[in-house]
Amino acid sequence: MNVIETQIPDVKIIEPKVFGDHRGYFFESFSQREFEEKVSKTTFIQDNESKSKYGVLRGLHFQKEPYAQAKLVSVVQGKVLDVAVDIRKDSPTFGKHVAVELSDENKRQVFIPRGFAHGFVVLSETVIFQYKCDNYYAPDFEAGIAWDDPALGIDWKVAIEDILLSEKDKRNLLLEEIYNL
């Protein structure tokens, strides 16, 4: 695997080695040993998968301590713009974000450590999206930041009128409201 650094040092882009021929392709999508050597000593305990259509924006989600989650995310089919926002108050990159296009073609993954809000928007007709998480889902500890928070300045690459949100995500707060800044 090839690990690519981002503007936020703890967020990593991972490119697997893909072996292809006339039959198709093969790649190792995850190796605990190699992941710990090259990315982070993280033990994933839950896998999730979602299917969404064009314009669906899921996020920006996070879980509060003690149920914060690190995630390793990837696309099985389709294409998304994946976004990680640093919400660690004492971090020099607090409020900054990394945006990465993930697709079934580039087979990239993104590692998002604890202390980040995460979201994605679907850029293809449909997408199948996978998440590996290092902590269990805890609904009483979940929270979200508004996708269109002007302080974040995220270009989602989809027209505003095409954005589709869940009722819950429509009620997400601004970053400054979460921390009472």
Image: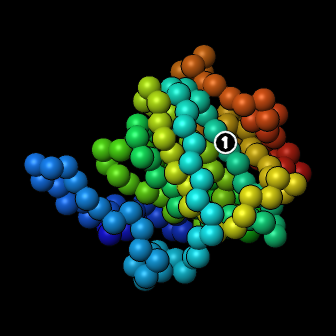
Examine the image and state in which quarter residue 69 appears.
bottom right
Measured from the top left, where is residue 156 in percent x and y?
Answer: 54, 34
On screen, residue 87 versus residue 56, left or right, reads: right
Q: Is residue 166 left or right of residue 173?
A: left
Give the secondary structure at mark 1: strand
Frontmost residue, 166 versus 84: 166
- Mark 1: few, some, or many residues within 10 Å (few <14, many ≥20)? many
| Residue 115 position within the rendered picture, expressed as x and y whole percent measured from the top left | 69, 64
**Rendered residue at 38%/54% (across/down):** 108
Identity, as a three-letter code, of the amino acid under mark 1 = Gly
Q: Which corner quadrant holds the N terminus?
A: bottom left
Residue at 51% x, 68% y is 9
Look at 81% across and 70% down and name the residue there: 66
- Asked whether, in this view, residue 32 is left or right of residue 44, the answer is left
Residue 150 percent location from the top left of the image = 69, 36
Return the residue at label 1. Answer: 59
Looking at the picture, how far across and down is residue 91, in whole percent?
68, 67
